[in-house]
Image (cartoon, helix red, strand yellow):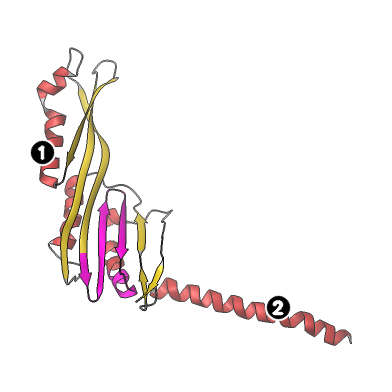
Amino acid sequence: MKEKTDQKHIVPWIFIGILILILISLIGYVLVTGVPDDYKNSTYVIPYFHPIVEMETYAGIIDTIYKENQLGLSSVKITDSVYTTEVGYFDPVTCKQTETLTVKTDNIPDYIQSVDHLLTDEELRRAYGNGGLAETTTIFGTWITNLTCTKDSDQFVISLQRDKLVLSGELSASTLRAINTWKGKIPELTDAPYKILMWRPMYE
């Protein structure tokens, strides 16, 4: 009688153990191969380890998608962009901030030119220097470039930002793997240790 009772207690634990093994196998499969190809991702957010500081670096990353087509896209176009920052002016003696001027534009050449002007223009530095020549620095704002892409049957948007990469739309596992391979070749896009993935699967 006791043996039968022990068997009754053992059976549920065997069943639970099998379920745990199946769950671990599924998680391992997704981590190794990615999301199955019959699923679509609506949102995929990847923060970088460090925000991008140099606009020239940022522009070069855009070129790898838009001009060099390293992702093997069927089509790609820049559909929206905004670049903002603030330039701070500081008293050369007290180091107190005396003024902040804003740059906002929709194209990178204008951004670079405007920021350079505000940082180096001697008249502005004298105007905000309290009798001296103000020190200047950039107070970073927002860089966003949205690229509308087509790859095979997938249609999606890559939003390249200063501090993260945001993917949205129809994204199969093969497209995500291609993006991950491309991203892995660019040091500035190294994932943050607190990487956040927001994924909602949608059937085709």
Q: Which residue is mark 1?
A: 113
Q: Quick one: quadrant of the N terminus?
A: bottom right
Query: Which residue is pictured at 17% across the width and 57% down the height?
Result: 79
x and y percentages locating residue 44 in the rendered image: 36, 61
For residue 173, above or below residue 144: below
Kindly indicate the quadrant of the structure image that contains residue 84: top left
For residue 196, side relative to residue 56 (left or right): right
- Write down the region rendered in magenta: 149-178
In the rendered image, the residue lying farthest to the top is 131
Work out whether residue 48 or residue 159 is closer to the camera in this orientation and state it. 159
Name the kind of residue labelled 1 in the image.
Answer: Gln
- Bin the neighbour count of mark 1 within 10 Å (Cα to Cα): few under 14, some 14-19, many 20 and up: few
For residue 13, side relative to residue 4 (left or right): left
In the rendered image, the residue lying farthest to the right is 1
Name the kind of residue labelled 2 in the image.
Answer: Trp
x and y percentages locating residue 11 in the rendered image: 73, 83
Q: Which residue is mark 2?
A: 13
Query: Which residue is pictured at 56% across the width and 79% down the height?
Result: 22
Work out whether residue 186 or residue 197 is closer to the camera in this orientation and state it. 197
Q: CA distance from mark 2 to mark 1?
A: 68 Å
Could you say whether the residue bearing mark 2 is in a helix, strand or loop? Answer: helix
Disc number at residue 39?
Answer: none
For residue 131, side relative to residue 177 (left or right): left
Kindly indicate the quadrant of the structure image that contains residue 53: top left
Could you say whether the residue bearing mark 1 is in a helix, strand or loop? Answer: helix
Q: Quick one: quadrant of the C terminus?
A: bottom left
- Bin the neighbour count of mark 2 within 10 Å (Cα to Cα): few under 14, some 14-19, many 20 and up: few
x and y percentages locating residue 3 in the rendered image: 85, 86
Kindly indicate the quadrant of the structure image that contains residue 73: bottom left
Q: Is residue 78 magenta?
A: no
x and y percentages locating residue 86 in the rendered image: 23, 33
